[in-house]
Image (cartoon, grey):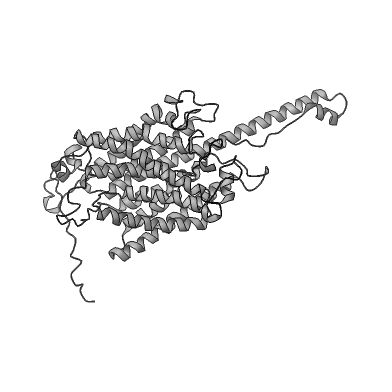
C-alpha cells in the first residue's frame, strides 16, 4: 500500500506559538492531530482494500462468463458436462491455491524460482503487505487460467482428468510462473528492483503471459494429445464445423467477461488511493486506473469489428461467434500493457490481435488441431502478441509511474526506450512455453496412457450429458409426441444448401 500524506505536529513548536503556560494545550492538540492522522491512514488502507476486493469480485464473475461462453460453444449434448467443469475449476482451484498456490506465487522472502511461505495462508495478514484480499484476488486469476484450458479440451475429456489438471495447474504450474514475473523476489519481475532482468524486468501488468498464455499453452497440449473430436475432420482431411448450440449463451458469456475484465486489468493496481507527485494533485493512481479501463475497452472494441470483417472476407458470413472471440482476443492482448500505453496504442493492439487470432485459427485448421473454443489460439496467440506489443509501445512516463523505484528503466522500443524490454519479453514468451510444456504436456500424456483422459467413442457420440451426467441439460418435446411427456427426442437440424441459386426477387 502506498503511504498517504501524514499530519505531523510538534508540541514544543506549537507551545512556542501559543505562548507561555500552553504546553499542556499543545500536547492535547498534537494528540488530537495524531489521532486524525491515524484515522486518515486507516481510511486509505480501507479504501484500497475495498477496491481490491471489488476487483476480485469482478474477476470472479468472469467464471460465469466462461461458463456461459463454453456452454454456448459446445453442442447441446455436452452442456451439463462443460458447466460442471467450470464449477469444479473454481472449487478445486480454490482449495489447491489456498494450500499451495499462493505460497508458491507470493510466499516471500524467497528465491527467484518459487515462494515458500504462507502455505494455507499461515502468517497472513503479514508485515510484507499481504492481506486476505490479495489471496482472493490472485485466486480469481488462477482459476481463470484453468478455465481457459477447459475450453480447449471440451466435449471429449473424462471428468477425472479435469479435476487432476485443474488442481495441478492452479496449485503449482500457474503459481510458479506468477512468482517469476509478479513476486518482488521473482527472477524476471519488474518489482525486483535489486536484480532486474536487462535492467527492466518483465512488464506483464495483468497477465497476457501469466494467465492467458499459461492457460492457452496448457489447453494446446491437452487438445493435441487427445486429438480432434469425432467428425471434426472428414476422411479427406477437410474441416467440418461442429457449431455450438447457442449463440445467445456465447454473447451473454462474452459480455460477462467484458464486464469482469474491468476488475482484471484496472484492478491489478491492487490499490487506488495513491497520488502521483505532490499531495492533493488531481492526478494520481485513480487516473491510471481510469486510463487502464479505457485502453482495455479500445483494444476489444477494435478487435471485434476487425475480426468481423476479416472473417466476412474469408468465409462470406457475418458471424457473431467470430466477433465475440475477436473481442476477447483484443482483451487478452492488451492485458499485459494496459497500464503503460496510450489509448491510441490500444487500438493498434486490438487490430493486430484480430489478425493474429484469424491467422492462428487458419493454422490450426491446416494442422488438424481441434479446439472447440479457440482457447489456445485466442489466449495463447493473442496473449503472446500482447507481450510483444507492450515491449514496443510502453511509454516512459507511465512505466515510471506504475513501476517506481528504478531510475532510467527501459520502456517501449517504438517509443524510444531501446530494445531491452523487448528482449526481456521474448524471454518471457520462451520460458512460459517451455515451463507449461514441461509440466502440463507430460501430465496430459500420462493421463492419456492411463486411459483417464479421453472418453470412449460411444460416449462421445451419445454426448456426455446422457452417458456421464444422467440426462440432457435441455428437455425437448416434439409436437407429435405431446401425448408422451416422458419421451425425449432430439431432432437433427439440417442446414439449407447455401450453394443453390437463390430465388429471384
Residue 503 appears left or right of 50: left
Viewer-nearest residue: 188 or 144: 188
Residue 492 visible (yes or no): yes
Quadrant in the picture for residue 313: bottom left
Residue 131's x, y, as percent?
50, 30
Image quadrant where one finds the C terminus: bottom left
Residue 324 appears left or right of 7: left
Q: How many marks?
A: 0
In the depicted structure, whether residue 18 falls above or below residue 188: above
Residue 418's x, y, as percent?
54, 51
Q: Residue at x 52, y 56 (%)?
A: 414
Residue 159 visible (yes or no): no
In the depicted structure, whether residue 247 falls above or below residue 161: below
Image quadrant where one finds the N terminus: top right
Viewer-nearest residue: 203 or 351: 203
Q: Residue at x 68, y 28 (%)?
A: 35
In the depicted structure, whether residue 188 falls above or below residue 301: above
Q: Which residue is most to the bottom? A: 505
Q: Residue at x 54, y 42 (%)?
A: 199
Viewer-nearest residue: 173 or 257: 173
Residue 12 appears left or right of 128: right
Q: Residue at x 60, y 34 (%)?
A: 43
Residue 405's x, y, as percent?
60, 39
Amino acid at each position: 500500500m502506498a503511504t498517504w500524506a501524514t499530519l505531523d505536529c510538534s508540541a514544543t513548536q506549537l507551545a512556542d506559538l501559543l505562548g507561555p503556560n500552553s504546553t499542556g494545550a499543545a500536547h492535547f492538540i498534537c494528540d488530537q492531530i495524531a489521532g486524525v492522522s491515524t484515522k486518515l491512514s486507516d481510511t486509505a488502507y480501507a479504501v484500497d482494500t475495498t477496491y481490491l476486493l471489488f476487483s476480485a469480485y469482478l474477476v470472479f464473475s468472469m467464471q460465469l462468463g466462461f461458463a456461459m461462453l463454453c456452454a454456448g460453444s459446445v453442442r447441446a449434448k455436452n452442456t451439463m458436462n462443460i458447466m460442471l467443469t467450470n464449477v469444479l475449476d473454481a472449487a478445486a482451484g480454490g482449495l489447491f491455491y489456498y494450500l499451495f498456490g499462493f505460497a508458491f506465487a507470493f510466499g516471500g522472502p524467497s528465491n527467484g524460482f518459487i515462494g515458500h511461505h504462507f502455505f494455507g495462508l499461515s502468517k497472513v495478514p503479514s508485515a510484507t503487505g499481504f492481506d486476505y484480499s490479495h489471496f482472493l484476488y490472485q485466486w480469481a486469476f488462477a482459476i481463470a487460467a484453468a478455465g481457459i484450458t477447459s475450453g480447449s479440451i471440451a466435449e471429449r475429456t473424462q471428468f477425472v482428468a479435469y479435476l487432476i489438471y485443474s488442481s495441478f495447474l492452479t496449485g503449482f504450474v500457474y503459481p510458479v510462473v506468477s512468482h517469476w514475473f509478479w513476486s518482488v523476489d521473482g527472477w524476471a519481475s519488474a518489482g525486483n528492483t535489486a536484480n532486474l532482468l536487462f535492467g527492466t524486468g518483465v512488464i506483464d501488468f495483468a497477465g497476457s503471459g501469466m494467465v492467458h498464455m499459461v492457460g492457452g499453452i496448457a489447453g494446446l497440449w491437452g487438445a493435441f494429445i487427445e486429438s480432434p473430436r469425432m467428425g471434426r475432420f472428414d476422411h479427406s482431411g477437410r474441416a467440418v464445423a461442429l457449431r455450438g448450440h447457442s449463440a445467445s449463451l456465447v454473447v451473454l458469456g462474452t459480455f460477462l467477461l467484458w464486464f469482469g475484465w474491468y476488475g482484471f486489468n484496472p484492478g491489478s493496481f491492487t490499490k487506488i488511493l495513491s497520488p502521483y507527485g505532490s499531495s492533493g494533485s488531481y492526478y494520481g493512481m485513480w487516473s491510471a486506473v481510469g486510463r487502464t479501463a479505457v485502453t482495455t475497452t479500445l483494444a476489444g472494441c477494435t478487435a471485434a469489428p476487425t475480426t468481423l470483417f476479416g472473417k466476412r472476407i474469408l468465409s462470406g458470413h457475418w458471424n457473431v461467434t467470430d466477433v465475440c472471440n475477436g473481442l476477447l482476443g483484443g482483451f487478452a492482448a492488451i492485458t499485459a500493457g494496459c497500464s503503460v500505453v496510450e489509448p491510441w496504442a490500444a487500438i493498434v493492439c486490438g487490430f493486430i490481435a484480430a489478425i493474429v487470432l484469424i491467422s492462428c485459427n487458419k493454422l490450426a485448421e491446416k494442422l488438424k488441431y481441434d479446439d472447440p473454443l479457440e482457447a489456445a489460439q485466442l489466449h495463447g496467440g493473442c496473449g503472446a502478441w500482447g507481450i510483444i506489443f507492450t515491449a514496443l509501445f510502453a511509454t516512459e512516463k507511465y512505466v515510471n509511474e506504475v513501476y517506481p523505484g528504478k531510475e532510467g528503466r527501459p520502456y517501449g522500443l517504438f517509443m524510444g526506450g531501446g530494445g531491452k524490454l523487448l528482449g526481456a519479453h521474448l524471454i518471457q514468451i520462451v520460458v512460459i512455453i517451455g515451463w507449461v510444456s514441461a509440466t502440463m504436456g507430460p501430465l496430459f500424456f500420462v493421463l492419456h496412457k492411463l486411459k483417464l483422459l479421453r472418453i470412449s467413442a460411444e460416449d462421445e457420440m451419445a454426448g456426455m450429458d446422457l452417458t456421464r451426467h444422467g440426462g440432457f441439460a435441455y428437455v425437448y418435446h416434439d409436437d407429435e409426441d405431446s401425448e408422451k411427456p416422458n419421451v425425449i427426442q432430439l431432432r437433427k437440424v439440417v442446414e439449407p444448401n447455401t450453394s443453390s441459386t437463390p430465388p429471384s426477387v
